[in-house]
Amino acid sequence: MLEKTTKMNMLYDFYEPLLTDKQKEYMALYYREDYSLGEIANLRNVSRQAIYDNIKRTELLLEKYEGKLYLYDKFIKRKQLFHKLDEKMKVEKLSDRSVLQIIEQLKNID
Amino acid sequence: MLEKTTKMNMLYDFYEPLLTDKQKEYMALYYREDYSLGEIANLRNVSRQAIYDNIKRTELLLEKYEGKLYLYDKFIKRKQLFHKLDEKMKVEKLSDRSVLQIIEQLKNID
């Protein structure tokens, strides 16, 4: 569950601008501020089921955008390569082939 | 016009997965294969105006996505930084502050 929350938070970060105001509001309360479905329902004076349905639909929408644009996926790949680069740079020379290879890989992620 | 075409091609590259099949088809014919509006109209047996309207709407949609996600903008920034990095790496040491600064800037583009 924690892993799912982390991933959903990241997807929300990337694709938030594509959501409606209501979708943004419920997602922010649920995923960022950790309100429960019941608490959001009370807060907004709608049924718990309505909140649940809205958030579920938004989650599917975020997964759909990720399936098309891969922004989260590319972000993770880039992060891993930068980490590798940092490690290499501690021990290798700048002109070392392995350093240059990592930079080439980074360039290939658009 | 050439500049506009180049930018529209790039926006199309980034946001193509978010378009409908028809939008993709007309954009590909017009921007990638350089057909004229009249030629596409003949090819698809619809009016030139219908093709024009469809492509105009798609262009606005691509600009709207760019205004929300900035994928093209980030791509250009990354490209410029990699170029700067390449130049620096020809003359500086790996541990040089200016090299490290560029890598930090790259990391900050998600």
Image (cartoon, coloured by chain):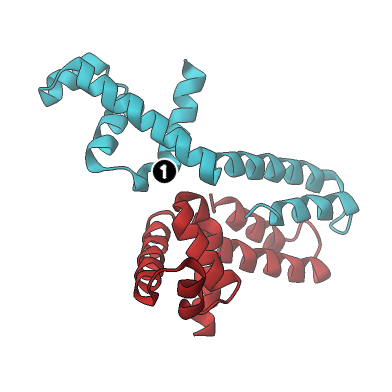
Chain colours: A red, B cyan
Q: How busy is the neighbourhood of tag 1: few (under 14 within 10 Å), some, or many (20 plus)? A: some
Give the x, y percent position of residue A44.
48, 66
Q: Residue at x 78, y 50 (%)?
A: B102
Give the x, y percent position of residue B78.
65, 45
Residue with the mark numbered 1: B15
Q: Residue at x 88, y 59 (%)?
A: B95
Q: Chain of mark 1?
A: B
Q: Residue furthest bottom?
A: A1
Q: Residue at x 53, y 38 (%)?
A: B67
Q: Nearer the viewer, residue A74 or A33?
A: A33
Q: Nearer the viewer, residue A53 or A68?
A: A53
Q: Residue furthest front?
A: A45
Q: Is residue B103 left or right of residue A60?
A: right
Q: Residue at x 45, y 43 (%)?
A: B14
Q: Please indicate, yes or no, whether residue A73 appears anywhere in the rendered image.
A: no
Amino acid tagged 1: Tyr
Q: Is residue A90 left or right of residue A43?
A: right
Query: Which secondary structure, mark 1?
Result: helix
Give the x, y percent position of residue B41.
17, 20
Q: Please indicate, yes or no, whether residue A62 appears anywhere in the rendered image.
A: yes
